[in-house]
Image (cartoon, coloured by chain):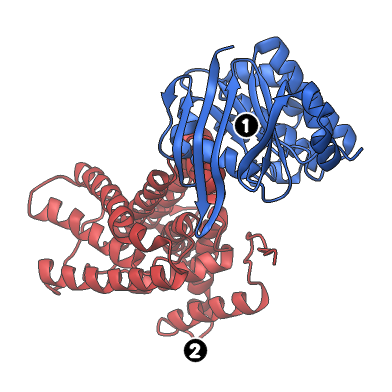
Amino acid sequence: MTALLELERVEARYGQVRALRGITLEVGEGEIVAVLGANGAGKTTTLRAVSGTVRRSGTIKLAGRALSGGPEAAAKAGIAHVPEGRGTFSELSVTENLRLGAYTRRGKIDPDVERMSAWFPWLIERGDQQAGTLSGGEQQMLALARALMSRPRLLMLDEPSLGLAPLVVREIFRIVRELNEKEGLAVLVVEQDARIALAAAHRAYVLEVGEVAVTGTSADLRETESVRRSYLGY
Amino acid sequence: MANFFQQVVSGLASGGIYGALALALVLIHRATGVINFAQGEMATFSTYTLWTLTQNHGWSYWPALGATLAISFAGGFGVHQFVIRPVERGSVLRVVIVTIGLLLLLNGAMTWIWSGEVRSVHSPFPTRTIDIAGVAISIQDLGTIGVSIGVVILLGLFFRFTKIGLALRASATNPAEARLVGVRVPLMLGVGWGLATMLGAIAGALTAPTVFLDPNMMQAVLIYAFAAAVLGGIDSPVGAVVGGLLLGVGLNLLGTYVNFVGADLRLPAALTVILAVLLFRPAGLFGKRVVRRV
C-alpha cells in the first residue's frame, strides 16, 4: 500500500507543554486509520499538527510532498479537518456551510451538493436553516459533508462521537466506512470510543503521553491485552 | 403636513448617511471586534481625495468618485495590514487606542496637507426641488437616499451571493474554521476594512455638499453613526442601516416639532439614544444577545 500521509518524528508543544514527543505514523491510500488514547495523550494535537493549526516540527508529507504552513495550505493540499466540537459555521446556513467547504476548489459545486444530498438526504430540504440551530448529530453530519465538499485526499475527524447518541454515532461511522469502500476515501480518525473506532478502522495507533505506545491492525489490537483492558474495558 | 413630509425626506437623507457610516462601523466591529474611532476621519480623508481630484486635477465627478473609492479601499486594507494587524492579538483596548491614535494622526495630516480652511465640494445632484404630490422635495435629498440605500443593497448581495462575501462572513464569525476550509482570514479581514473605508468615502461624499469640507467634517456624523449602530445592534448590518434611518428621521422631527430641541440639541439627543439603548436594550433592535460561556 502506498503511503498518503506520513508523519516522521513529529513534535508539537503548547507553551512549555510538549504535547507530541516524536510521533511516527502513516495513513495509506484508501485506508481508515484510528488514533486512540486517553485524554491528553496527544490525539487531537496529532490532527492539529497535520493541518498546521499548531506549531510543529518533524516531517509531515502528503503523497510524498512535505506539508508546511498553516491550515490554509493544508486545505489547499487536500486535507479536510473536522475539528472537535463539530466545526460548522454556526451563524451561516447549511448551504453556505457546504459552499465554504468547496472554497479551495474552482468550478461548479452543484454536482457536489447533489452528491452530498445522496449521503445526507435531509441537507437539501434544510439548506436555508442556520447551522447553529441543527441538532448535535446533524451538525456533525454537516461538518462531515462540508469536509467532503472539498473532495479531500485525506479526511481527518476529531472525536466525531463526542456528545452524540449511540445511534447517531453508528450512522456517522457507517457513512465514513461506506465512503471509504465506495470512493476509496482515506480517513484519519481520533476517537475516545475505542470500540467503535476499531470496528471502522483498518489500523490504529494508541498514543500515550505524546508517543505511539502500540500500533497494529484493528483485529490485532482488539486481541492485545493492554489495549483491551485500558480502552475496551473487558 | 407638507412640512412633515419634507422633514421626513430630509431625515431619511441624513439617516442614509448615518446608516452608511454605521454600517462601516459594524463591518469593522464584526471583523476585528472593535469600534473604529478613526472611521469618521478616514471618511473625511477620502472626501479630501475626491476634492483634490476634482479641484486640483480637473477630473469630472464620477471618475473622481470611482478613483476615490478605489483609493479608499486600498487605504482601508493598508490600515488593517500595517496598523491594526500588529496589535490585533493583544487586548481589545490596545486596538481601540490605536484607532484613536489613527484619528488624531489623520486629523493632523489633513490639516497639514490641505490646511484647515473650509472647502466646498460639489454635489452630483442638482440643487433644485421637485414636486411630489404637492410637496417640494430636494433632489439632493432623494439622491442621497437613493445612493445610500443602493450601496447597502449592493453590499448585501455581495455578502450573500459571492464567494468572497461568504468567505468574509465566515472569517468574521468563525475564523478558526474559516482557515480550516482554506480561507486566508487576515486577507479577508483586510478586505472588510477596505469595504468599510469605501462606505465611509460614500458617506463623506454625500455629507460634504450639505456642509463644508474641513478636517473635522465627519466628527458629528460619526457620533450619529455610533448612535445608529448601537440602536440597530452593533453586529447587525441591517440594524445599522435601519438604525441610521430611524435616527435621521427621529432627530429631524424632534428638531422641528419639539421647540426646545432645535439644531443645537441634536447631538445630545443622539447621545441620549446611545445611553438609553445601552441601558435598556444592550443588543439593539436587531442584535443577538451575546451569551458567553464561562
Q: Can residue B1 be seen by looking at this rendering?
A: no
Q: Residue at x 35, y 68 (%)?
A: B99
* Residue A36 in the image: above or below residue B28: above
> Hey, what amino acid is under mark 1?
Met
- Circle 2: element type: loop
- Density class for disc 1 (Cα within 10 Å; few <14, some 14-19, many ≥20) is many
Q: Residue A226 appears at what percent x and percent y? A: 80, 38
Residue that label 1 marks: A156
Q: Residue A16 appears at what percent x and percent y? A: 51, 60
Is B203 positioned to the left or the right of A4 in the image?
A: left
Q: Nearer the viewer, residue B22 or A169?
A: A169
Chain that is red in the image: B
Q: Say which mark, if any, is on residue B260.
A: 2
- Density class for disc 2 (Cα within 10 Å; few <14, some 14-19, many ≥20) is few
* Residue A74 in the image: above or below residue B293: above
Q: Residue at x 52, y 31 (%)?
A: A7
Q: Which of A213 and B16 is in front in this view?
A: A213
Give the distance between the C-alpha atoms of the residues marked 1 and 2, in whole angstroms: 67 Å
> Hey, what amino acid is under mark 2?
Phe
Is A95 positioned to the left or the right of B22 in the image?
A: right
Q: Residue A234 appears at what percent x and percent y? A: 92, 37
Q: Can residue A160 be seen by looking at this rendering?
A: yes
Dividing the picture into quadrants, the one containing residue B294 is: bottom right
Q: Residue at x 82, y 42 (%)?
A: A230
Given the image, what chain letter belongs to the residue carrying mark 1? A
Q: Chain A is drawn in which colour?
A: blue
